[in-house]
Amino acid sequence: MTTERQNATGRIVAAQGNLMTVEFDGIVRQNEVTFIKTEGQRLKGEVIEISGNLAKVQVFELTRGITCGDTVEFDGDLLTVELGPGLLKSIYDGLQNPLELVAEQAGYFLPRGVYLIPLSRTAKWDFTPTAKVGDVVEKADYLGTVPEGVVTHRIMVPFTFIGKGKVKSIAPAGSYTIEHEIAVIEDEHGVAHKVTMFQRWPAKFPIRFGQRILPVEQLTTACRIIDGAFPVAKGGTFCTPGPFGAGKTVLQHQISKYAHIQVVVVVACGERAGEVVELLKEFPELDDPATGRKLIDRTCIICNTSSMPVAARESSVYIGTTIAEYYRQMGIDCLMLADSTSRWAQALREMSGRLEEIPGEEAFPAYLSSRISELYERAGVLKLKNDSTGSLTIGGAVSPAGGNFEEPVTQSTLAVVGCFLGLSRGRSDARRFPAVDPLISWSKYNDRFAEFGDETTRRRIEIAKKAQKVLFAADEIGKKMSVVGEEGIGRDDMVTFLKGEFYDAVFLQQNAFDKVDTATDIARQTEQLELVEMALDAELSFDSHDSARRFFLTLQDKVIQWNYTAKNDAAYADRKETVLKTLKGHTHG
Ligand code: ADP
Ligand code: MG
């Protein structure tokens, strides 16, 4: 299905950083992949600008040794992602080199110019056909299934297939490699196309064959401050901006581990290698409570750390998104997490500078906000042909310098996402984790869930809203208290302040190191919120500020004890009863 044309060739006439100016003969496409022949190696790059017979090429590798006059081969293809069984459990770099193979073959450091095949050509997969000879099909239609870990992988008509086609042959159920011909499809012009279990797709183009529908279902992240106060929709978008060290990476890892979702793609983009090593060491060991298998079975990791070439940061984000979209097309709920989109934006800025484009705010290119919105727009719920749906939720960490949210990457992101989870230095310094600040965060999905959700959902949202009001009031009182001292405020204000602190301590904060508290399902969150509501509504009276404080600290302690108790633990009911008793003992009427 590739168009027949001679690929262009060229030679380097100028070099600036990793941006090469190449004079070429023939036809060159925007975003076409190129290979620069230097010192006996072929270094991968991508065309980012064409004018006349000159192309600007960004090189994804260290450019040492490249000289003017070096030959450049144009590949004819755009930067593509290989899609097929075997993506899950894989760990790739920003050019989809499988890092495990890299480690085996090259001892952890991939020499430049070496590109490994992303999907194994020797692994066999159990294929079961679902299409029959004579079926009329089009791109993205299902031809068969392959069990891949926890998901049913659908083998689809290649997305590049044009028009309608007729299935001429289909392989019987059996075990095949991904290169095996599993079907032949004849197109409208009578041309036969061989179909295998894998295909390639250009990373910068969305895979979106179906009807986009409004995301109305909540994604359970198992993180209370998100699910309870600032929820995210399946197929929606969210961002977690925050200063260095506030806990963005820890929060993303928590979500990738505990979110109730079928497939997770984690993109570690431009962050420190040490963190990624932790992720890679930890992940294969972790059990998935939902399936009893390993978490890595449902996960694909793309990592392009700060020590890897900057240009490949850009591709890593697109590769991750494309892989997640591919699974969405199978009717699967997917989540793509990128840490951090600021590093990706910095790569754009660097390249824009070399292209001598007119800079926008803080020297970011003028198209920064459109690139950011294009990325988040790839999220969404798709209604597929067979009436099933698939979704892609996208969450991006943003790391603005000094934690100042008034900068272009944060602002452009806030303009497009449905949920803003802002981490603050104040909260992380106070070790209130997750350090998502409830006074600045918001979610546009709350109203939608209230409209489309069931009775319990509405109740949860109602309680969280009530608690949010108390939180704001408590914050005001807290500020006043820091000026006039505790004795300068009235007893009622003191109680409101303590109620706000209580809600924060027992619900919004969550202990990532306690194996029960680290992840809370929705049913338990509802139970916790109902208890919070009882405490917020309680008419309490105290004879001193101190006795009020003592009471709330005791109550808080008891609730946290209960939070740490597993549901199937014999002490669960007792500990809840103790909380209720403590509360009742102090309530009037
Ligand atoms: P960032 O990615 O924002 O720079 P990290 O996610 O690496 O920050 O977090 C920095 C540190 O903060 C962690 O090493 C850990 O000590 C602490 N931290 C973050 N989140 C939590 C949490 N949920 N519970 C306990 N400690 C946390
Ligand atoms: Mg981080």
Image (tube, helix red, strand yellow):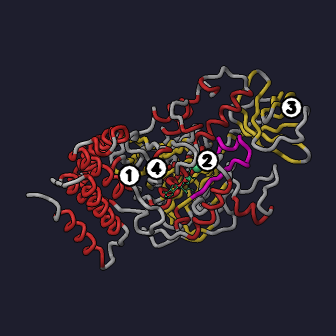
Q: CA distance from mark 2 to mark 3?
A: 28 Å
Image quadrant for the N terminus?
top right
Count residues near mark 4 (Cα–Cα under 10 Å), then give few for <14, some for 14-19, many for 20+.
many
Instruction: State which tag comes first along the sequence, 1 or 4.
Output: 1
Amino acid, disc 1: Ile
Mark drawn on residue 12: 3
User: Is 417 colored magenta in this rendering?
Assistant: no
Tell which of 384 and 427 is nearer to you.
427
Residue shown at 45%/42% (left/top)? 422
Q: How far separated are the C-alphas under marks 4 and 2?
A: 29 Å
**Residue linked to disc 1:** 225
Where are the magenta residues, as a range? 300-316
CB-based contact (under 8 Å), mark 2 and mark 1: no
Which type of secondary structure does the marked residue at label 1 adopt? helix
* Residue position for label 2: 319
Q: Is mark 4 within 8 Å of ligand 1?
A: yes
Q: Position of residue 187 (x, y in %)?
A: 56, 45
Name the mark on residue 435. 4
Does any portion of residue 448 appear in the rendered image?
Answer: no
Mark 4: which amino acid? Ala
Q: Is residue 211 left or right of residue 55?
A: left
Mark-to-mark CA distance, 3 and 4: 49 Å
* Ligand 1's quadrant: bottom right
Spatial distance from mark 2 to mark 1, Cα to Cα?
30 Å
